[in-house]
């Protein structure tokens, strides 16, 4: 989908997921949902679903959006369906990240469903907060 390849990043296949003890999936948001590339990757896990190879494994998520209205809550909520259909145990961060969640001076993303950031046009990096 026009994204340049990342030659220094290892590429896994859906079947590689069976070897993991747990997961933290990260993806960008497109129109309030996970990107089509990640959705296609999850769609290719049907064989793992049929044989329940991911059932019982813990999974969390993190994500980035382009704007404040870009899906900081809808993205993780729609991604959870991928996990629970496999029988994975969704492990959210909840409201467990201290006083920083009430801090109003810095732009920050996230929700109780997962860690998030505002990427803007892709040039903005997450802050320490």
Image: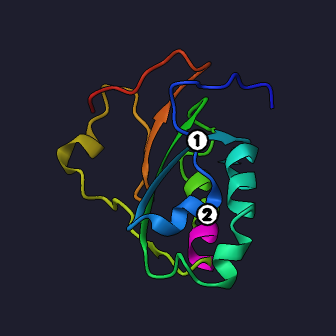
Residue 114: say if magenta: no
Q: Is residue 52 above or below residue 69?
A: below
Residue 120 location, x and y as percent? 58, 22
Query: What element does badge 1 sit on?
Result: loop
Q: Is residue 2 left or right of residue 15?
A: right
Occupied quadrant, residue 105: top left
Q: Is residue 90 left or right of residue 34?
A: left
Camera-nearest residue between 17 and 56? 17
Q: Is residue 126 left or right of residue 10?
A: left
Alpha carbon of mark 1 to alpha carbon of mark 2: how far?
12 Å
Q: Is residue 58 above or below residue 25?
A: below
**In this view of the protein, can residue 77 be seen by the observer?**
no
Which of the image's four quarters has the C terminus?
A: top left
Are there few (<14), some (14-19), or many (20+) residues within 10 Å of tag 2? few
Please report the bounds of the magenta region as a residue range. 81-85
Q: Which residue is mark 2?
A: 15
Of all residues, the one furthest to the left in this rendering is 99
Of all residues, the one furthest to the right in this rendering is 1
The label number, if any, that marks residue 65 in the structure image? none
Residue 76 location, x and y as percent? 55, 56
Please tell me which residue is depicted at 26% across the width and 36% down the height of the picture: 103
Occupied quadrant, residue 6: top right
Q: Main secondary structure of the magenta part?
A: helix
Of all residues, the one furthest to the bottom in this rendering is 51
Please tell me which residue is depicted at 19% across the width and 50% down the height of the picture: 98
Residue 57 location, x and y as percent? 43, 74
Q: Which residue is mark 1?
A: 11
Residue 82 location, x and y as percent? 63, 67
């Amino acid at each position: 989908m026009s994204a340049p390849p990342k030659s220094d990043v290892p590429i896994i296949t859906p079947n590689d997921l069976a070897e993991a003890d747990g997961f933290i999936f990260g993806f960008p948001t497109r129109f309030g949902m996970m990107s089509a590339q990640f959705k296609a990757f999850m769609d290719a896990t049907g064989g793992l679903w049929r044989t329940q190879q991911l059932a019982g494994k813990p999974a969390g998520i993190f994500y980035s959006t382009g704007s404040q209205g870009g899906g900081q809550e809808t993205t993780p909520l729609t991604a959870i369906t991928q996990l629970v259909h496999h029988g994975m145990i969704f492990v959210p961060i909840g409201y467990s990240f201290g006083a920083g969640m009430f801090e109003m001076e810095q732009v920050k993303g996230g929700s109780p469903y997962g860690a998030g950031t505002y990427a803007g046009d892709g040039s903005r990096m997450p802050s320490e907060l």
